[in-house]
Amino acid sequence: MVEKMINIRSIEDFNYEGKTVLLRLDINSPIDPATKRIVSDNRISKSLPTLDYLINQGAKIAIIAHQGDTLDYQDLIPMAEHAEILSKKLGRKVKYIDDVCGPAAQKAVKNLKKGELVLLGNLRYLTEEVSTFENSVKLKPSEMLDTYLVRSLAPIVDCYVNDAFSAAHRNCPSMTAFEEILPAASGLLMFKELSALTRVMKYPSKPSIFVLGGLKISDAFGMMKTVLENGTADKILACGVTGQVMLMAKGYDLGEANDKFIKDRSLDMFIKPAKEYLSKFKDKIIFPVDLAYEDDCKRKEVLIEDLPVNCMYMDIGHRTIDRFKEVIKSAGTIFVNGPAGVYENKIFEDGTKAVWQAVAEAKGYSVIGGGDTVSAAEKFINTDDINYVCTAGGAMVRFLSGKKLPLIEAMEKAYSKKF
């Protein structure tokens, strides 16, 4: 399916015997704020097939990756533990150099032998790799060839492989510049991610249901209009804050506490587009018919006809849950991004738990993605019951919104080049 949509080289297109491969992974992992240790190695595990393939092909592998950023500075730490975890999972030593592309890193890359691996230092230690630089300077890939990373590493490697689809929305040297001057291919994980999302976007079994929740409603609104207009989604199940904004757009008074919560976070800006979508797409958007709140440390539920109550709504109610479950049960394709409520609080886990159990039991093809989405799924179900768990968040949302991703553009450009 991917080949029909985009032209990018597969990892299987090149011979890596004795070649030095610069491999861009996304193994950015959630970190315990107290211990600074990795709490989930999901992305690390997902990178193993590509690593195994290159090892078996006799490649010398120099890995570049990032951990944290200016926006999550608390996670901006060295990547020694990443190398330790990779070593255990691969059953062979992955050397770590706490140097991104300086003399020590270059020496380590030059000294690699067939089947050996080195993980270089955190890419986000470089100014040119952080999001604030990307957003402020806005370099084109061709203008990135003079950056420290590219001019330091490009001359000492033979080819470039990218297996970091979850960072595909980033236009930075490690993602989009090496394709300008090196043979470039996508890793096995990247093809899997693109295949799963392409199936949802272009070839969904019908009916296709999108469950959109959580607090980051810019994601939901970023893709909602596109998937409804192009027929990708037959129904949107709006929950979380997305569902509440839909109710406000329908004219329901959610009460002072919820109004303040939404306005303080500038989420009221989505009320206008919500009105437009509800008018244009009518019965395609299913919003909550009841909501849950806390009263005297107990869960209470209220029908939307009886709103408002002067409490925060933290979950969908059981009438909404039953309605959602019926829709999910009959779906041919199910995509989920965002929990239904504040599932971390046991009082308000019912909606999220029920949605996940319904998705796990459904016969339709299911895809989930986004950090909080996956965390919620792992709490309530065996994610092996989901057809595909996407490692991406922002890249996934942009892809499903029909937006071109910088990585894909760079890989397509490299496809037409002869090296």
Image (spheres, helix red, strand yellow):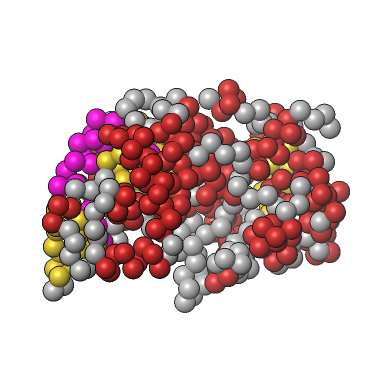
User: In the drawing, does residue 397 fall left or right of residue 233?
Assistant: right
Residue 260, x across and y down, in percent: 33, 68
Q: Nearer the viewer, residue 167 or 300?
A: 300
At a point 70% along the width and 60% down the height, the residue shown is 136
- State left or right for residue 146 relative to residue 329: right
**Image height check: is 386 above or below 138?**
above
Residue 224, given in percent of the width and then of the height, sits at: 42, 41
Whether residue 48 is visible: no
Q: Nearer the viewer, residue 301 or 82?
A: 301
Residue bounds of the magenta highlight: 314-335
Q: Which residue lies at the image location 61% right of the left edge and 38% below the top edge?
A: 404
Measuring from the top left, give residue 365's x and y in whole percent.
Answer: 36, 32
Quick check: 399 above or below 244? above
Depicted 204 relative to depicted 43: above or below: above
Q: Residue furthest bottom?
A: 34
* Image-based side of 76 in relation to 133, left or right: left
Q: Is residue 324 magenta?
A: yes
Indicate yes or no whether the magenta region holds residue 156: no
